[in-house]
Every structure is written in C-alpha cells, then in structure tokens.
C-alpha cells in the first residue's frame, strides 16, 4: 500500500523478565514489543519497533538489530522489570511483580513513523495515553493488546484495575486483543460472545478474545469466528509471550489480505509452536503453514 513506510509498527517497552516455572527459572528480555518483534522477524512484511528502555539495557536493542529488526530506541530513565511466576503446570495462571517502570510514550515520538498498523502493547496503565491512541489512529489502524491498561503496581505487586477511559480509548481502536478475564473486567460480562459484542458496540472493528487452551473467538461485522487451539506436539514449556506471538501472526496475515478465520488459525498455530519452548517464537511462515497442514484435525474442542 502506498503512503506507508511500514506495514506494522509495534509500540511497547522491552522488559527485563524473570520467568519462574515449577521446572526452571529463566532470565530474559520480554514485553509485548520483544515477543512480537521476534515472532514477526522472519515474515515478509515491512516492520519497525518503537520502544523505550534504560541505557544499561541497550544491548537488547543491539541484539534485535543484529537479527534484522528495525528499532527506534527512545531513552528512558529505567527499563521495566517484570517477574512472571507460574506456580503450577497450568500456564493459563501467573503471578506478576514489577520492580521498575519506564517512561511513557507520547505522540511526538512517532512524528517520523508512518505505518498501516500500529500494534500497541502497554504493560502498565501509564505507558500510553488515550491521546496517543487517538493520534496514531489518525495515521493508521490501531491494534491494541489491552492487558497493560488493566494493571496497576502497588508495592511491586501487579494488581487488576479497570481502564477508566476505556470507552473513549476503544473508540479509536480497530483491532482489540483481550483474554477472558480482561474482557470481563472491561465489560462486566463473563459470557464471551456477549462481552465481545459490548466491545464492538464501543467501536472496535475486530474483537479478539483469547481463551487459553480453549482457543480464541473473533468478532467482526456481527460475525463470530471460532479459532481452535492446536494441541502442542510436546509438553507445554512457557506460555509467556504467547498472546504477543498470536497477534504477530494475526496482523501478518491481515496485512497479507487473509480473512479473519485464516488469520486466526495462523496466529493460533504460531502461539502453539511458541509454547513448546522457552523464549520467543523465531520460526518462519513455512513452518507455521506446515504445522497447520499437519495438525488441521488435532485441536482442542471449543466450548
């Protein structure tokens, strides 16, 4: 499409993560921006990342650049530090702690960036203002992973909170990704289809509700698309970043003109491949397509 420098621009802080599972403790970079960038690296799209982190963590950006990712690294006094604790084998449940918070993004940071899609991955409520969402919606389509707007930090503990400006903010969002619990916080509704309809009524064009091991549901133009969850070929190792990997696959497919069902299935396949190992997904579209072909009938059933 002419007029755009990039197909996708991801916006979010890179974090320093400590992932604790019953089997291991791993220290690694993290955050939506890191997992999304790694997952989309080998896909044939024009991609850039806008992030912000402290001087001591610039090596993470250097590593991303060395692997072919174009990055604008804004200076921040601190880098976000997250601890993700999975107390059991159930990777749908985690406890989070935050010891450092980074500086927020502002509209002026994007004056030189023109993208077809802006994928926003706030980690905490103060990362991105509604004014920024509005400004970016005037430049391209906004895709939002809402999780950060539903978190606040007290004494380093991450606590759930509602997004007070949700109706105003979601008015400017074209694609929204939320899990079941995030959907319930936003809408007050536990039933997935009803909750998705409420979010659509607030202005979102494509509502994606992820259901963990039960798959996901997409709503657009009043039509629901049921996306299966593919059974991992090996044991579940680390679910951190699966939602970001899903959205990388989904937006990649949408950029390429895929319909919502195909985009959702491609995204789910990428997330399944990612969950089989620790760290980000670094595979190729050919690997995802092969997985889809080989596993079309081996899925979890949806409720």
Image (cartoon, rainbow, N blue to C red):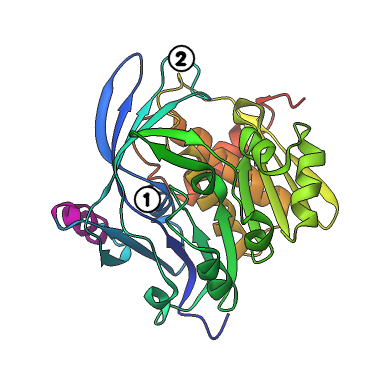
Which residue is pictured at 52% across the width and 33% down the height?
272
Please name the residue that numbered disc 1 is placed on.
38
Give the position of the N terminus as an image quadrant: bottom right
Q: The C terminus lies in which quarter of the figure?
A: top right
Left or right, 36 with respect to 251, comes to: left
Task: Work out whether residue 204 can be spotted.
Answer: yes
> Which residue, as the protein is rendered here, is positioned at the far right?
222
Q: If you read the primary sequence from the N terminus, does the residue marked by circle 2 or circle 1 appear first?
A: 1
Is residue 196 in the magenta section?
no
Determine the residue positioned at 42% across, 56% down. 127
> Between marks 2 and 1, how big is the CA–CA gap?
25 Å
- Residue mark closest to the camera, 2 vs 1: 2
Name the residue beneath numbered marker 2: 89
Q: Nearer the viewer, residue 86 or 64?
A: 86
Q: Quadrant of residue 212?
A: top right
Please tell me in which quadrant of the rendered image residue 302 appears.
top right
Residue pictured at 69% horizontal, 36% vertical = 184
Q: Which residues are magenta?
A: 56-66
Asked if residue 158 lies left or right of residue 61, the reply is right
Few, some or many residues within 10 Å of mark 2 (<14, 14–19, 20+): few
Image position of 134 (left or right of 56):
right
Viewer-side residue, 240 vs 197: 197
Q: Position of residue 190 (x, y in %)?
A: 75, 31
> Foreground residue, 266 or 147?
147
Residue 80: x and y, percent? 30, 47
């Amino acid at each position: 499409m002419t007029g755009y420098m990039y197909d996708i621009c991801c916006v979010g802080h890179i974090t320093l993560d400590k992932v604790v599972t019953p089997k291991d403790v791993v220290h690694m970079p993290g955050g939506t921006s890191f997992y999304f960038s790694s997952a989309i690296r080998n896909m044939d799209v024009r991609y850039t990342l806008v992030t912000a982190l402290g001087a001591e963590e610039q090596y993470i950006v250097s590593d991303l650049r060395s692997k072919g990712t174009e990055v604008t690294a804004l200076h921040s006094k601190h880098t976000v530090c997250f601890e993700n604790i999975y107390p059991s084998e159930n990777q749908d449940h985690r406890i989070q702690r935050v010891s450092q918070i980074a500086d927020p993004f502002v509209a002026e940071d994007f004056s030189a960036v023109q993208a077809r899609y802006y994928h926003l991955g706030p980690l905490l409520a103060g990362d991105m203002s509604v004014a920024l969402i509005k400004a970016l919606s005037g430049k391209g389509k906004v895709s939002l992973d809402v999780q950060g707007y539903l978190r606040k930090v007290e004494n380093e503990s991450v606590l759930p909170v509602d997004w007070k400006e949700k109706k105003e903010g979601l008015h400017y969002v074209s694609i929204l990704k939320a899990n079941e619990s995030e959907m319930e916080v936003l809408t007050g509704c536990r039933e997935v289809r009803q909750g998705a309809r409420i979010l659509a009524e607030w202005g979102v064009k494509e509502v994606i509700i992820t259901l963990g091991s039960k798959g996901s549901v997409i709503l657009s133009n009043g039509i629901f698309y049921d996306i299966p969850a593919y059974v991992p070929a090996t044991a579940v190792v680390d679910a951190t970043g699966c939602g970001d990997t899903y959205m990388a696959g989904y937006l990649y497919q949408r950029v390429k003109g895929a319909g919502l069902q195909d985009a959702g299935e491609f995204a789910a396949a990428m997330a399944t491949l990612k969950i089989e190992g620790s760290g980000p997904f670094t595979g190729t579209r050919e690997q995802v397509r092969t997985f889809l072909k080989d596993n079309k009938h081996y899925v979890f059933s949806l409720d």
